[in-house]
Image: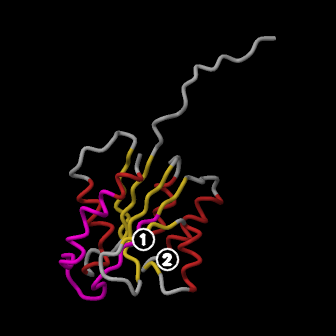
Amino acid sequence: MGVPYFSGQVKMNKKILIAGIGNILLTDEGLGVHILKELSKKKLPKEVELAEIGTAVFELVRFMDGKDKVIIVDAIVSDEAPGTIYKLTPKELKSSRKNQLASLHQFGICEAIETSAQMGNTPEIVIFGVVPKDYQSIGTELTLELKKSIPKIIQEILKEAK
């Protein structure tokens, strides 16, 4: 009986999803979607898929299917200064409900991740939450504080997308 041949190659090209969440009609609440638009202007590896989820957070379940890694970008409420970036796991996001840290779409994100896991999809998940200045006013532009933080957010996402 022979030994199976192993070529020594390991799966290097992970299928990565970067999902932007938010309502672009409510200033900084649309941060995740604005970040996706900026990322779409960059040359990304072919294994990276961008998904503009918007406010239909449950659609995340469909996009997560077959991915090795999922990076979610959303506004997150905190007492920290606008533009502060948090890097969270789903467990940290879920447990943060007891603290002063809460995603504006927290229930939907956690529920989508749990539903995906129940369907057998368990990719590595990283959530980038950014503190907004204004997430209640009507407007399609980000505040100056969040516009200034875009390069740093994109830098962190691209580091994570390797």
Residue density around tag 1, few if under 14, some if 14–19, many if 20 or more, within 10 Å: some
Question: Where is residue 95 drawn, in percent x and y?
Answer: 59, 77
Identify the residue at image location x=30%, y=44%. Answer: 44
On whether residue 143 falls in the magenta region, the answer is yes
Furthest-top residue in this view:
1
In this orientation, which residue lies closer to the viewer: 30 or 4?
Answer: 4
Residue at the spot of label 1: 86
Residue 62, label in figure: none
As displayed, is residue 86 above or below residue 139? above
Identify the residue at image location x=20%, y=71%. Answer: 147
Spatial CA distance of label 2 from label 1 is: 14 Å
Identify the residue at image location x=46%, y=63%. Answer: 59
Identify the residue at image location x=45%, y=78%. Answer: 103
As displayed, is residue 151 above or below residue 93? above
Q: In the drawing, does residue 148 fall left or right of residue 99?
A: left
In this orientation, which residue lies closer to the viewer: 143 or 139?
Answer: 143
Q: In the drawing, does residue 136 fall left or right of residue 148?
A: right
* SS assignment at label 1: strand
Identity, as a three-letter code, of the amino acid under mark 2: Gln
Residue 106, label in figure: 2
Please identify the quadrant where the N terminus is shown. Answer: top right
Q: In the drawing, does residue 73 fall left or right of residue 91?
A: left
Identity, as a three-letter code, of the amino acid under mark 1: Tyr
> Mark 2, mark 1: which one is toward the viewer?
1
Question: Where is residue 57 drawn, in percent x and y?
Answer: 45, 69
Magenta span: 127-155
As displayed, is residue 70 above or below residue 77? above
The tag earlier along the polypeptide, 2 or 1, is 1
